[in-house]
Image: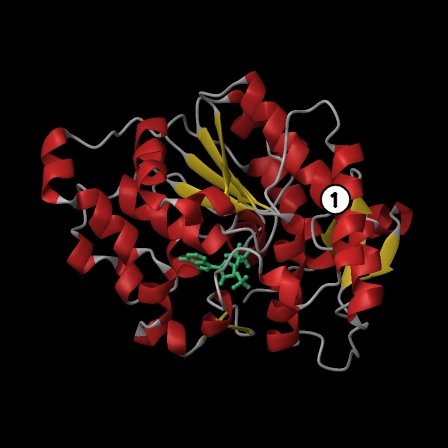
Amino acid sequence: MEKKEVSNELQELLQTLEQQTNWDGLPLVKYDAFWLPDIALRPILSAQKYFKAKDSDIILASIPKSGTTWLKALVFSIANRNVISIDQSPLLTSNPHTVVPYLEFNLYSYQENPNLQDLPSPRIFATHMPFKMLPDSIRESECKIIYVCRNPLDQFVSHRHFWLENKIEKVAVPLDIDAAFDLFCQGIHHFGPLWDHTLGYWNAGLKNPQKVLFLRYEDLKEDITPHVKKIAEFIGSPFSPEEEKQGVVDQISRLCSIENLRNLEVNKNGYILDVLKNSSFFRKGEVGDWINHLTPAMAERVKDLMASKFDGSGLTFKI
Ligand code: PAP
């Protein structure tokens, strides 16, 4: 990976920003009221400056560990179903994160201003950026945004397992679960506070439902079929009656299921970005795993936080 020199401008900005160490030992910076992994700041500023959205683009947004991998696989398969047959899908030989890149961890991390103009339409990009941090052209163009969120307790547990499994900051001794949870409740974690991240997209979806599709991991788990159809309609490519008769919706759902993806050779081995195990993106994929790791008191604390943060917004999570 090409490591960009940190510009003087960025150095100066960094000096004005609050900094923290996440429980996993990774540095965080507070930018525009969100805690970002420090390595994401420069690429986010570059994307804000240079990224030009096209009306045909599809942007997949999430806070980490909310169902991004699943959403990438689903949207790629739905959007490209007339170009690539399911038995030839690149998802059979590449991790979904290789197939759909992140703006901040891949494209604008490798280069300050990558040439993305000639990528085939629809271009599909992912991001963990909060809504208000998105490059202006994403909000101002006709491009589509699909956001997936997950109940905070499962998100926290999933995130913790992911970083312990990958142990990015090799020398760091991660904080214990109580201390890590305390930071989480203060909103100090990758792209946190989770409440504000989720509310940003929730409100944007309420304001313009043609622009932002708001999905919950728990709903996808409950029944994937209507969601595959909903995504297809939302991106302007609904399934035809013939496709439905041929079982294309089920084929895509099966291809993208955790059971299928985790058993593919590519996802059993290898790494993303040289450090993240492909297998670590497919742990349990269950709703309610928090109960095996968190106490009832922790759950109450999050329920109280949600009640106050989401008060009047109409946003709820199933816990
Ligand atoms: P990311 O933000 O690093 O991309 P993300 O994909 O959002 O991670 O979240 C990973 C979670 O989604 C994992 O949850 P768990 O730790 O509770 O198990 C992972 O298992 C789950 N996941 C990944 N792929 C799928 C899938 N195809 N279907 C359902 N869940 C999935």
Q: Position of residue 110 (x, y in %)?
A: 54, 58
Label 1 environment density (alpha carbons within 10 Å; few <14, some 14–19, many ≥20): some
Q: Residue furthest top?
A: 207
Q: Which element type, helix, strand or loop, lies under badge 1?
A: helix
Q: 27 or 242, which lies in front?
A: 242
Which residue is painted at 36% across and 28% down in the image? 234
Q: Position of residue 223 (x, y in %)?
A: 37, 44
Query: Vertically, is 117 above or below 73?
Result: above
Q: 180 or 73, which lies in front?
A: 180
Query: Vertically, is 260 above or below 222?
Result: below
Q: Taking 29 as reference, is 158 left or right?
A: left
Which residue is painted at 28% across and 42% down in the image? 78
Which residue is painted at 89% across and 50% down in the image? 18
Q: Which residue is mark 1?
A: 303
Q: Amino acid at mark 1?
A: Lys
Q: Taking 254 as reference, is 41 left or right?
A: right
Q: Taking 286 as reference, is 236 left or right?
A: left
Which residue is painted at 35% across and 65% down in the image? 259
Q: Taking 272 as reference, is 223 left or right?
A: left
On the question of residue 124 being in view, the answer is yes
Q: Position of residue 118 (x, y in %)?
A: 34, 41
